[in-house]
Image: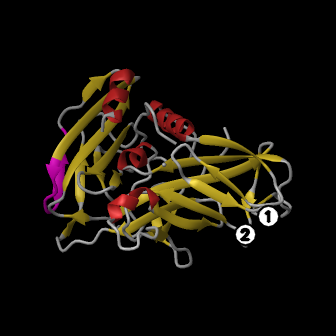
Amino acid sequence: MSSVFFFSCEKEIDNVILPPNIGTTPATSEIGKFFEDNLENATQTINVNSSNSNQTITSNKGFTYTFGPNTFINASGNPVSGSFTIEVVEATTKKEMMMINRPTFTHSGRLLVSGGIVSLNATQDGQQLSINDSEPVSASIPTDNYLPMDFFDGSLDSLGGFGWDESEDDTVITNTGNNNGQDSTFFEDMFSFDFEIDSIGWINCDYFYDSNDPLTQVEVVLPDTFNGDNSAVFIYYSDINSVASLSDYDADGTFDLGASYSTPVGMDVSFIVISEYNGSFYYQLAEATITQDHIEVISVLTLLTVDELEIILNSL
């Protein structure tokens, strides 16, 4: 399967399974395989022919990508000629972000609210192409949200956890159209987040979630036999488009946000647990309000078939 890279800014993700806290390494468990399947199912492939003029492609979700004849280059640095393939993966909801395991936290531990995630990759005959940074791709995400967004690059840390860093050079323009003073709701389909893609990698259109409430660490404790080797744990925020991934690197069954990570006290959330043990799948959802030094004890997980698990996750 061709390599896929992601940006945060949505192809529809149908009947997918929640992934664990892993990166792009090959699957070593059934949970890991479901993660790979999610990425594959979420990938939209578009065949393109090179042109002497600008081209615009539109994804299934209505995202648009405009590029010129010199935008995509081969390993020799020359503009691609002939037919080539563009792959996109897009997520605009917290469910979709959770399914592809792209939590909305910075590497420094700050909570983000996302306007969308995008991945754009390009290959020709199986060979990786690059983006010419002097002629980038112009991307546009349709939205009914006209709040200002910032541009964040995504990457894995040294432990394999995924996070975001605010870009110092790239920006997101919130395009609200020209409403000439009319009711903005009339023009909601005209809103978009516009930005440039000048390299392969993850991008997230977000803003920092600012709150006057105190911040706290969060722990989730799972039953015996369930741990970071066979389970995924997420915080699913009720009122904002955000999701957090918790980690259990020492596989002792206690998951946390990480040493430098914290979340505001008083937020309504759901803790979502997916596990695979001896070929069977288990699930639990626990609703809670975050308290200071929050510890959520999950005493039991429910055994489910794969079909039952898919139905539950896709109903979130």
Q: Is 115 rendered above or below residue 14?
A: below
Q: Please, is residue 89 above or below residue 185 in the view?
A: above
Q: Amino acid at mark 1?
A: Asn
User: What residue type is disc 2 on?
Assistant: Glu
Magenta span: 288-298
Q: How many marks?
A: 2
Instruction: Name the residue located 48 percent from the left edge and 64 percent from the top edge.
Output: 193
Q: Whole-percent x and y of residue 131?
A: 71, 62
Q: CA distance from mark 2 to mark 1?
A: 7 Å
The residue tagged with tag 2: helix, strand or loop? loop
The location of residue 78, given as percent across then percent down, is 86, 62
- Taking depth in this image into account, of 285 and 71 the one nearest to the observer is 71
Residue beneath disc 2? 135
The picture places residue 301, in percent across and down from the top left corner, at 24, 31
Residue 14: x and y in percent read 45, 33
The quarter holding residue 191 reads bottom left
* Tag 2 near tag 1, CB within 8 Å: yes
How crowded is the residue under tag 2: few (<14 C-alpha within 10 Å), some, or many (20+)?
some
Q: Which residue is tagged 1?
A: 70
Q: Is residue 115 left or right of residue 128?
A: left
The stretch drawn in magenta includes residue 86: no
Residue 292 is left or right of residue 19, and the answer is: left
Q: Is residue 296 magenta?
A: yes
Q: Quadrant of the N terminus?
A: top right
